[in-house]
Structures are given as structure tokens and as C-alpha cells.
Amino acid sequence: GESVGLHLPTLSVQEGDNSIINCAYSNSASDYFIWYKQESGKGPQFIIDIRSNMDKRQGQRVTVLLNKTVKHLSLQIAATQPGDSAVYFCAENFFSGNTPLVFGKGTRLSVIA
Amino acid sequence: SAVISQKPSRDICQRGTSLTIQCQVDSQVTMMFWYRQQPGQSLTLIATANQGSEATYESGFVIDKFPISRPNLTFSTLTVSNMSPEDSSIYLCSAGRGQGQPQHFGDGTRLSIL
């Protein structure tokens, strides 16, 4: 399946605050999830990933939470900076690899300086 | 991570013409993927390109409109044929190194049809 949204939801946060971006995925068989950041004029850039055998994974200033029961992902960004302004997509996949990604609708993060 | 280069980065084309988009990966990969992203929207899979076999197309995309080549393990092309204004979009290719590895994307080709 595919997810296509007509209008991207927007999240506005003050610089320095924490951001939480949510995503629902569709396939309960998916076992690998990825968050991407897309800046204007660029392709999606990998941020962080998580396997289904985990419910939390931390990176530098970012944390991904996975709730398989309700098929929900969230991306938390600590101390949000102006450079974090972008569109964020979650994508579901299979850990075995070599399969296409199914993208969520995307959220536009706007950081207010 | 795989480095993916796409060209052209953008083009403005006349209705009825065709454009071929190239995607180069800096290492050998089994699968490459082509996506379309319409303005303000998410990414939609067009097709999966496996070296040595015909591309597999998603519902709503056909080979006559979007022929794909995959001549080797580092390169693929997508052609947008007989273009109409509805084909104005961003076209992106991606590839991953396999199990447990995230796919990486090129910066896309921004296509406008007049």
C-alpha cells in the first residue's frame, strides 16, 4: 500500500524546545522502520532506524519510539534548532532488505527562532 | 551509507516529449527503486529495478509510460514518456545495501511540463 497526503500537517515549535513527530504505519508485518528528513530541494535524508524487536532507540538529539500494538512511531527531537526545519517522513520496510519503502504522510516541522 | 547521484536535477520539458533520468550509486546494490513525489505530498513507489530482469511496476504505473533500465549493479534510468502536465513532479531513486540497511536517496529530478 501507499500513503499519500494532500496537505502536510505542520508542527511549529520554539527553538530550544523538544519536538515530537508522530506516524502511523499500515502493515503489521513490517519489522523495520526508518525516519527521514527532507529539506527543500533535496531528497529524503536518513535520520534513524529501529527494528521491531525494540521499542526505543536513541541517536544524537533524536529518539525513535515504536508501539507495535497500535502501529505507531514517533520521532523526538531534543533542543530543536532552526536547522531542523524540514519535512519528516516515517517509512516502513522489512529488515530482510531489498524491498521498497512505504512512506507515511509526512509532517512539516517549522522552528521558530 | 550509499551515495546516490541523480541527473538532471531539474528540467522543463514540452508536452509530448520524453526525458530520461539517470541514477548512479557509488557501490553495487541489488535493488534500486524509483519514486514519485508530487508537490506537498509523500513519496509513491513507481517501480523496483533489479539488475538482469524487468522492472516490477506498482499499480497505476506502466512500462510504456515509465520504461526503466538497469544495465548493471550501480546504475539505473527512468524515462518519463510522452509527457503531460500531470507528470510534473519530483522523481527520486533510492538504493540500500541490503539486510538491515536503510535506503538512501538521490536529491531527485524536478520535472515541469509545459
Image (cartoon, rainbow, N blue to C red):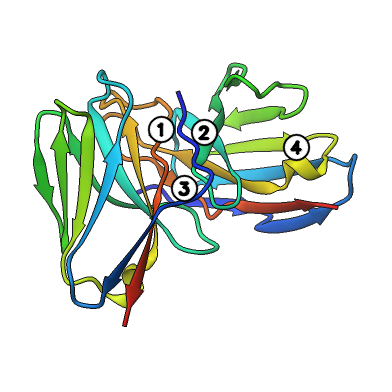
Choose between A12 and B108: the one closer to the eye.
Answer: A12
> Amino acid under label 1?
Leu
For label 1, the residue is A101
Asked if residue A85 lies left or right of residue B6, the reply is left
State which tag comes first along the sequence, 3 or 2: 2
> Amino acid under label 4?
Val
Q: Chain of mark 1?
A: A
Whether discs 3 and 2 lie on one chain: the answer is yes
Q: Secondary structure at mark 2?
A: strand
Label 3 CA crowd tier, 10 Å (few <14, some 14–19, many 20+): many
Q: Is residue B57 above or below residue A105?
A: above
**Cα–Cα gap, marks 4 and 1:** 21 Å
**Cα–Cα gap, marks 3 and 2:** 9 Å
**Cα–Cα gap, marks 4 and 2:** 15 Å
Q: Secondary structure at mark 3?
A: strand
**Which residue appears at 66% of the width and 24% of the height?**
B61
For label 4, the residue is B80
State which tag comes first along the sequence, 4 or 2: 2
Q: Secondary structure at mark 4?
A: strand
Residue B105's tag is 3
Residue A70 lies, in percent from the top left, at 18, 28
**Which residue appears at 9% of the width and 37% of the height?**
A55
Label 2 CA crowd tier, 10 Å (few <14, some 14–19, many 20+): many
For label 2, the residue is B33
Asked if labels 2 and 4 touch by Cβ distance under 8 angstroms, the answer is no
Instruction: Name the image quarter holding residue A100.
Output: top left
State which tag comes first along the sequence, 4 or 3: 4
Residue B66 lies, in percent from the top left, at 71, 29
Whether discs 1 and 2 lie on one chain: the answer is no
Whether discs 4 and 2 lie on one chain: the answer is yes
Q: Chain of mark 4?
A: B
